[in-house]
Image (cartoon, rainbow, N blue to C red):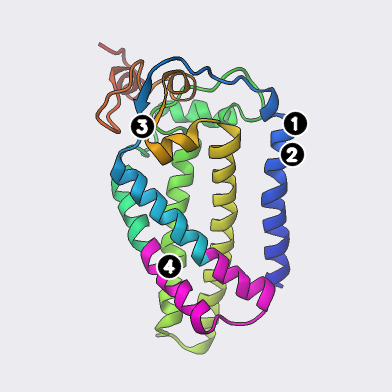
């Protein structure tokens, strides 16, 4: 049963972005590329994110190969790669949680972003957002929760401590959480690469165009603070409901 749920879920996760791109993204406003670039992500953030991404892909590929293609339990080098990459992912996810937890706390203007779904299904321009918008913050906390769930349940599968009936429940929890995680990452990747051109460059090279910042993260800064993750007066004012000084 889970095999077919996985197939349908993954196909749907791949098909919806294609439809969204064809019928909406191509007609959206694209911010210009005015001279000047802003540092958006530090080297530490980029290394942690890249490590998390690569290890996640290995974990997902080996796990779903076993479920969808092999229809069997992980064995041999497949199991070694799955468990080894899972350990690396745990460290990288922990690093990202420490780096971004403060920037991903929800504030008042995130509700405005959420009500219009970030403008992805209509509206003019992008809603106000700080360093991370409401959708990115929701993905961050979902990733932390699903990551903790898949990693802890995976550890309990490696070192079983419960009776067989409970271990079966742990296994089901592990693979359904993993499926939700993969679907969420597919959507996250689509938004970063195709729906919002310029986002990928930021997470790879660290810098983004000034106009990109003004369009997508208008509350982060009129001229973003070089100190990564430090909101300027505009964002602080939006969080407190006051005026920037």
Helix, strand or loop status at disc 3:
loop
> Whole-Å distance between the Cαs marked 1 and 4?
37 Å
Return the residue at label 2: 19
Residue 115 position, x and y percent, is: 56, 29
Q: Nearer the viewer, mark 2 or mark 4?
A: 4
Q: Earlier in the sequence, mark 1 or mark 4?
A: 1
> Whole-Å distance between the Cαs marked 3 and 4?
27 Å
Residue 104 position, x and y percent, is: 37, 39
Return the residue at label 1: 23
In the current view of this chain or complex, which residue is farthest to the bottom?
A: 163
Q: Which mark is residue 85?
A: 4
Q: Which residues are magenta?
A: 60-89
- Residues packed near mark 4 inside 10 Å, few (<14), some (14 to 19) or many (20 plus): many
The answer to whether 86 appears left or right of 179 in the picture is: left
Residue 166 position, x and y percent, is: 50, 82
Q: Nearer the viewer, mark 1 or mark 4?
A: 4
The answer to whether 44 appears left or right of 89 in the picture is: left
Residues at discs 2 and 1 in contact (Cβ within 8 Å): yes
- Depicted 160 relative to depicted 87: above or below: below
> Whole-Å distance between the Cαs marked 1 and 3?
30 Å
| Pick the front one: 124 or 237 | 124
Tell me if residue 205 is in the magenta stretch: no
């Amino acid at each position: 049963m889970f095999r077919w749920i996985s197939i349908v879920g993954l196909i749907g996760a791949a098909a919806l972005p294609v439809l969204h791109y064809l019928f909406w993204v191509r007609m959206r406003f694209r911010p210009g590329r005015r001279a000047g670039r802003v540092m958006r992500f530090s080297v530490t953030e980029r290394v942690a994110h890249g490590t998390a991404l690569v290890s996640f892909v290995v974990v997902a590929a080996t796990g779903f190969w076993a479920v969808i293609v092999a229809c069997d339990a992980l064995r041999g080098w497949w199991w070694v790669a799955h468990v080894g990459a899972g350990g690396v992912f745990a460290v990288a996810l922990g690093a990202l949680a420490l780096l971004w937890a403060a920037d991903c706390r929800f504030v008042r203007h995130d509700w405005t972003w959420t009500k219009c779904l970030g403008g992805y299904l209509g509206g003019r321009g992008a809603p106000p957002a700080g360093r991370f918008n409401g959708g990115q913050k929701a993905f961050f906390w979902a990733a932390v929760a699903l990551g903790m769930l898949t990693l802890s349940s995976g550890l309990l599968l490696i070192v079983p401590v419960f009776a067989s009936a409970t271990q079966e429940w742990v296994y089901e929890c592990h693979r359904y959480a993993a499926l939700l995680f993969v679907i969420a990452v597919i959507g996250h990747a689509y938004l970063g690469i195709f729906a919002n051109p310029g986002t990928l460059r930021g997470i790879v090279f660290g810098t983004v165009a000034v106009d990109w910042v003004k369009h997508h993260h208008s509350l982060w800064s009129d001229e973003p603070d070089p100190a990564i993750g430090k909101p300027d007066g505009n964002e602080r004012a939006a969080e407190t409901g006051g005026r920037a000084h």
